[in-house]
Amino acid sequence: MDISNTIIRIRNRYRRSLSIHYGQRLLELRPKFPIISFTFDDFPRSALLEGGAILQRHGICGTYYVSLGLLGRELPAGPGFLIEDLRQVIAEGHELGCHTFAHCHSWETTPGVFEKSIIKNKHALGELVPGAAFKTLSYPIACPRPRTKRRAARHFVCCRGGGESFNVGPTDVSNLQARFLEKSRDNPDALKRLIDENTRASGWLILATHDIAETPTPFGCTPAFFEVIVQWAVTSGARILPVARAWEEITAK
Ligand SMILES: [Zn+2]
């Protein structure tokens, strides 16, 4: 047995538990109809050029979580977004969400530095795409510290983490659950079941990934796989909305 791996696993479980149970902003979420949101973290160009094209063909939009400090960079999930991609995201009706300026590790970055990176990303967006504003955030790399969740809550209507399931009932809206598609690449039926459960529960299912490519990185999936999931979502009875639009629907009086 590898002791250091065991220690890392125990440490990560401890962090996750703190992240889930503290710094919460609890809200009773009761969507009037089932909702599914497609989100892309980082975002590699392929998320828009391949993934966005699939969403557009179905007449639906997603959320692109962007770290503007990564503009034009080579990312772990492939070539990163360019300025024209930011404009295209907005022109096509998608949402641009915040992923911090520097793609801060959500646990290992101190809450103060994390918040500064949120503010820097906001200012950078104002310069690059005048008039655009972030309404929601996804936490980079790891689960957030409780104090980081409290700081992030000052800047966004809601924030998204990772997780397994959909959001319904009493929900920490500073750490909404999202299911990463790449974790089910070998078992798409698990996603189909989750989509159907979300419909039955009238919940809010947030799906997440990175690149959409014929040869995806470990962080993404193929266009064919993504297309299947999108088709299931579209025919599930759920409305497909970007995160901020879903939030407006759910919280509308
Ligand atoms: Zn990321």
Image: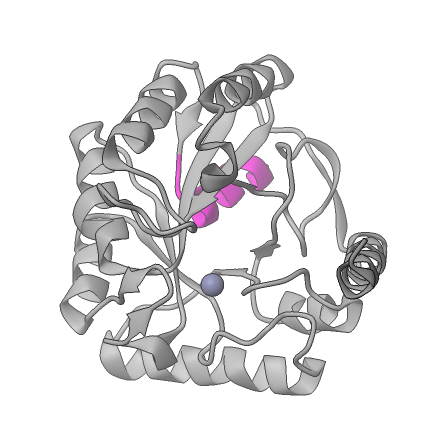
Q: Nearer the viewer, residue 152 or 3?
A: 3
Q: How many marks?
A: 0
Q: Is residue 19 visible?
A: no
Magenta stretch, main secondary structure, is helix
**Magenta highlight range:** 241-253
> What residue do we see at 55% from left, 76% from top?
104
Dividing the picture into quarters, in which one does residue 79 lie? bottom left
The picture places residue 235, in percent across and down from the top left corner, at 36, 14
Residue lying at 68% horizontally and 31% vertically, measured from the top left: 168
156 sits left or right of 150 in the view:
left
Q: Quadrant of residue 74?
A: bottom left
Q: Position of residue 232 (x, y in %)?
A: 38, 18
Residue 183 visible in this rendered orientation of the protein: yes
Whether residue 243 appears in magenta in the rendering, the answer is yes
Residue 211 position (above or below residue 183): below
Along the line of sight, which residue is nearer the eye, 119 or 194? 194
